[in-house]
Image (spheres, rainbow, N blue to C red):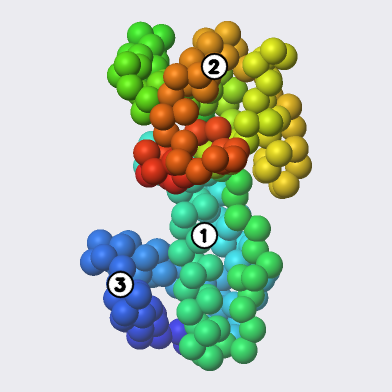
Amino acid sequence: MLNQDLWRQRFGEYLELKGRTRRTVESYTEEVTRFFEFLEDTGVERLADITLEVLQEYRLELHRHRQANGRPLALGTQSNRLTIIVMFMRYLYRSRFIVLDPSAGIERPRVPEVLPLDLPSEEEVLRVLTAPDTTTPLGLRDRAVLETLYSSAIRNTELRSLLLDDVDLVRRELRVQRGKGGKPRVVPLGDEACAWTEEYLRNGRPWLEREPGERTVFLSCRGQQLTRVG
């Protein structure tokens, strides 16, 4: 017979040692209680009897479960609840209460990605783009950076790695040499981005350059490649 209270207490203490909040500990141990109730209903009496098949049945139980309003659990809720049980099984395995971890082969519900609905308006985008003081070298740089990111949708790290040879204002394109997966690619650049990049290269970058021969496009106030914070 499984001692539900004992394992609930031990798992709770383990979570506390991991620095989890009180609310998280209560939530996780409550889910373990529900899991033990399922095990009791299905006739599982020992920890060693919890197999991958048992966990798959529990996943199916979560899928079939209906709330008071008759609706099924959201996929995100199903995934979160199953993740807690996976964590519990890993705790048992790493603490050597079980010989094998049956949760290693469990497949969790896939939660579809949802695009954000609160996209910025055209006015809000324009407000951000026009925020830099373009009468200064740093302001010109910031405006060129914002316009380039907005126009090309390249990543922050990719923008910071751009070299002068990667910018072709005649063809209105960027050559991203160190893209995702290490694969280079060519990215088109809009009119505004080209115009502000050209203005920055002419009237902003020369004032920021400290070392002759520096090839990085967007320089910090110390004449070096930009970091994540500027």
In the image, residue 221 above or below residue 129: below
* Residue located 50% across and 33% down the image: 218
Q: Which residue is mark 3?
A: 19
* Quarter where residue 26 is shown: bottom left
Label number found at residue 82? 1
The residue type indicated by label 3 comes to: Gly
The residue type indicated by label 2 comes to: Glu
Q: SS for tag 1?
A: helix
**Dot 2: few (<14), some (14–19), or many (≥20) neighbours within 10 Å?**
some
**Dot 3: few (<14), some (14–19), or many (≥20) neighbours within 10 Å?**
few
In the image, residue 98 above or below residue 192: below
User: Hey, which residue is sitting farthest left in the picture?
Assistant: 22
Closer to the chain start, of discs 2 and 3, is 3
Tally of numbered discs: 3
Q: Which residue is mark 2?
A: 198
Image location of residue 156, percent across then percent down: 52, 37
The residue type indicated by label 1 comes to: Leu
Closer to the chain start, of discs 2 and 1, is 1
Q: Which numbered mark, 2 or 1, is in the foreground of this view?
A: 2
**Dot 1: few (<14), some (14–19), or many (≥20) neighbours within 10 Å?**
many
Q: SS for tag 2?
A: helix
Q: Are marks 1 and 3 in contact (CB under 8 Å)?
A: no
Left/right of residue 214 with respect to residue 69 in the rendered view: right
